[in-house]
Amino acid sequence: MEDDTIKLLRECNAGIKMGISSLDEVMEHVQNSTLERLLRQSKDTHCKLGSKTHEYLRECHDDGKEPAAMAKLMSWMKTNVKLGGEESDRVVADLITDGCNMGVKTLYRYLHQYQAADEKAKKLAEETIQAEETLIKDMREYL
């Protein structure tokens, strides 16, 4: 059980870090003040979830996990290529929606893979999924 708990928490940790990084990357390209506010609120939510993840990992005597270097590079390249040609809120919303969809898909996969994780870790993964799904809904008006 503890092994699945740590593995699930590590994946949540890496995914949350990836989400925060992606939000930071697009923020300077946002033109609409309401969209900017939504993205900042989401970043705050992700930071709180990240803090909770770190707290749980410390309780398990683990340092967490960084996002895969290749995933970070691919995200950075996609963001910069798409925004390099057109700086618009639609492009930002599209990038964020794609990232959130990937996060939701990945976290559900890990929830199924690490079924023996404790309830606290599972709840955190579900809270993270909920945050991603909320942001997807918020982005719809800007697509």
Image: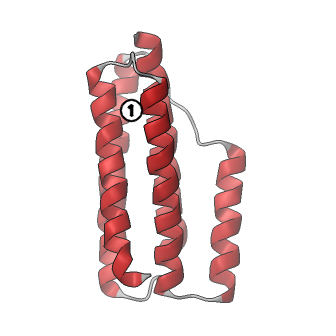
User: Quarter-wise, where is residue 54 in the image?
Assistant: top left
- The correct choice, above or below, for 131 with respect to 117 in the image is below
User: Quarter-wise, where is residue 143 in the image?
Assistant: bottom left
Residue 37 locus on image (x, y percent): 30, 75
Q: How many labels, in total?
A: 1
Q: Is 138 or 84 nearer to us in this picture?
A: 138
| Quadrant into which the N terminus falls | top left
Which residue occupies 32% across, 68% down? 137
Residue 36 locus on image (x, y percent): 36, 78
On screen, residue 46 versus residue 143, left or right, reads: left
Residue 134 locus on image (x, y percent): 30, 61
- The correct choice, above or below, for 59 with respect to 39 in the image is above
Residue 29 can be seen in this image: no
User: Quarter-wise, where is residue 91 in the image?
Assistant: bottom right
Q: Is 88 or 48 nearer to us in this picture?
A: 88
Which residue occupies 28% across, 43% down? 127
Q: Mark 1 Cα within 10 Å, few/some/many (few <14, many 20+)?
A: some
Which residue occupies 40% across, 24% down? 57
Kind of element beneath mark 1: helix
Q: Which residue is mark 1?
A: 54
Residue 41 locus on image (x, y percent): 29, 65
Q: Which kind of residue does numbered mark 1 sit on?
A: His
Applied colour scheme: secondary structure
- The correct choice, above or below, for 41 with respect to 103 in the image is below
On screen, residue 64 versus residue 39, left or right, reads: right
Residue 43 can be seen in this image: yes
- The correct choice, above or below, for 107 with respect to 35 in the image is above
Which residue occupies 49% across, 25% down? 113
Q: Is 107 or 61 nearer to us in this picture?
A: 107
Toward the top, the furthest residue is 1
